[in-house]
Image (spheres, rainbow, N blue to C red):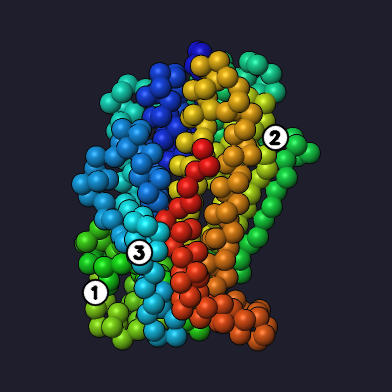
Amino acid sequence: MRVQVAIIGAGPAGLILGQLLHKAGVDTIVLEAQTPEYVLGRIRAGVLEQVAVDLLDEAGVGARMHAEGLPHKGIELLIGGVRHRIDFVGLTGGKQVMIYGQTELTRDLMEARAAAGLKTVYEAKEVSVHDFDSDHPRVRYTKDGVGHEIECDFIAGCDGFHGVCRASVPQNAIANFERVYPFGWLGLLSDTSPVSEELIYAKHERGFALCSMRSHFRSRYYLQVPLTEKVEEWSDDRFWDELRRRLDSQAVAALVTGPSIEKSIAPLRSFVAEPMRFGRMFLAGDAAHIVPPTGAKGLNLAASDVRYLSRALVEFYGGSSTGINHYSARCLRRIWKAERFSWWMTNLLHFFPDTNSFDQKALEAELDYVVHSLAGRTMLAENYVGLPFDD
Ligand code: RFL
Ligand code: PHB
């Protein structure tokens, strides 16, 4: 079989790329290791930047997001029991974010791909990438025990942090930058109305807490927990009790609790692999970089990478290699700013067990500065709603 672009991974990066290329008349196949149900069962991100919203519109999959998503004009920081609002609209000249779960977005993308009759193979096993340093790359996989080979012009490695594409690059051709944090986030999803209209990021001496949502009827809460914690040891009651301890009296009074419909612990990591192009193979999304979720950037970066990649590939088929030659550098400029922001938000809002008392005081002073200075609040708002593209 032959296609122009073989996309490995049917997460947001792979599916958005597939949709954008389809709109431009470029032929793709998507190979996904898991079943569609498994992909949809992963509860992950919930906040979309305006530029990601615009991209989904461009990809033709924005209708349900606009009907059901919740535009948010700001967030609240809860520090030492006092709330400070970060007014995105006022601070950024009108920008806001959209609350729309990754699960819903993925469902929209899957349906659009199926409706357009595009080639997608779920439960593709033993996926391997070959000859991407030549003009004739190939991808092999097995499905139901039968081996297949795809000839293509390009391979898009959209296969997440544990995927096969980055792992297939010779070690001396890639540089990894990494920071692992000494805690994780315990997340709980429940069909209860959210505690507040906007997200609350709470810094507390017992650890960070986040009040988020998926809709007016579905809430998502997170607690900073040590990496040694086991999710089985967290009954719903224990979770709600701990969350109450980290919130202010207004939130405690408004909190509606109920049975969890999902509970999981995710470790926090910052990671970047450079470069993101290896001959005719490109990495995009979590395959190339990971951010801690504090800045809500993971999914947004995946969207921004494939925005650059789709334009570069369309340019290539139009006769110019400029886009593909600049892909890696263009992505990394934006990625490193999001990495810095996510790392900064994480450092500022979490409790670090090993931080010395001087550093602790300096962080408190920085947070005090951020919420009380127009420049500080503007920096936070500008990064949170998403930095502009440089093209
Ligand atoms: P994904 O979503 O991981 O999709 C990659 C897809 O590739 C498939 N795959 C393969 N397919 C074929 N062959 C192989 N050899 C393959 N190996 C892997 C996988 O099954 C998968 O379907 O990456 P993508 O598309 O780059 O999208 C990135 C986002 O999913 C990610 O950045 C965010 O969800 C990050 N993230 C969060 N971001 C937030 O902004 N807020 C959050 O609350 C949040 N929670 C999370 C998260 C990421 C998590 N991970 C990756 C462990 C919680 C978790 C648990
Ligand atoms: C979420 O709703 O899952 C969410 C929101 C904001 C974040 C991280 C996660 O910073």
Residue 235 pos. (x, y %):
37, 73
Tell me the CA gap for discs 2 and 3: 45 Å
Residue 28 pos. (x, y %):
45, 22
Of tags 2 and 3, the one toward the viewer is 3
Q: Given the image, on which type of amino acid does mark 3 rest? A: Gly
164 vs 219: above or below: above
Which labelled disc corresponds to residue 256?
1
Residue 31 visible in the picture = no
Of tags 3 and 1, the one toward the viewer is 3
Q: What residue appears at the point 62 percent right and 33 percent down from the top-left corner?
A: 326
Q: Given the image, on which type of amino acid does mark 1 rest? A: Val
Callout 3 secondary element: helix
Tell me the CA gap for discs 3 and 1: 30 Å
Callout 1 secondary element: loop
* Residue nearest the observer in this picture, 199 or 163: 199
The residue wearing badge 3 is 90
372 vs 220: above or below: below
Mark toward the start of the polypeptide (3 vs 1)? 3
Tell me the CA gap for discs 1 and 2: 49 Å
* Residue nearest the observer in this picture, 13 or 325: 325
Mark toward the start of the polypeptide (1 vs 2)? 2
Disc 1: CA contacts within 10 A as few (<14), some (14-19) or many (>=20): some
The residue wearing badge 2 is 169
